[in-house]
Image (cartoon, rainbow, N blue to C red):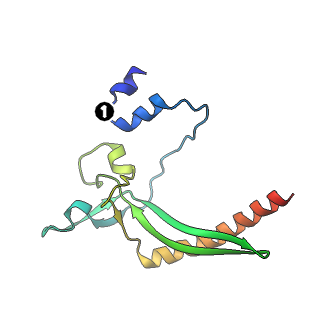
Amino acid sequence: MASLKQHPDKKYSYWLKNSDDTFIIEKYYKSDYICCLHPLEKECSYQKEYQYDATMRIAFILQYNENKITYQFLGGFWKLPLKALQEKGTVNEKTISYCKPPFYTAIDQILLDEVNIHMEKAMLLLYEIMLNKSLE
């Protein structure tokens, strides 16, 4: 436990305090990188694009009313890590979303439309299965 207290990445201290008996183990999978301006350089005259291992977030509403399931897309964005892939930094700094402004950027509309089509199909199917299970 002492090593968690002294770990240079303070996010690890969560595991020192957490007393839950269950947890989720995740695995990192490489994805296509996105190119965008560095969030801290958007106002600078030397703007250049950087590559990021970003995380896409989309929001939607699933509704069940009068035996009909509907999907309503609300929007989406990319969450960026603290560091671009070209910058010096730890693996965590280059892969884990920073979740603070200005480390967000827009999703290309063509990609967002494509993702939304797939999400609508998948979420409507999932919701239907969930509703059928709850009615059994």
| Within-10-Å neighbours for mark 1: few <14, some 14–19, many 20+ | few
State the image coordinates of residue 16 (x, y, percent, origin top left). 45, 28
Q: Classify 117 as above or below 88.
A: below
Q: Position of residue 45 (x, y in %)?
A: 12, 70
Relative to 128, say whether 29 is above or below: above
Q: Quadrant of residue 35?
A: bottom left
- Which residue is nearer to you in this view: 70 or 9? 70
Q: Quadrant of the N terminus?
A: top left
Q: Nearer the viewer, residue 127 or 37?
A: 127
Q: Is residue 63 above or below residue 40?
A: below
Quadrant housing residue 9: top left
Judged left or right of residue 33, residue 44 is left
The percent coordinates of residue 108 (x first, y second) are 41, 75
Q: Amino acid at mark 1?
A: Pro
Q: Residue at x 42, y 61 (%)?
A: 32
Question: Does 52 appear above or below 20?
Answer: below
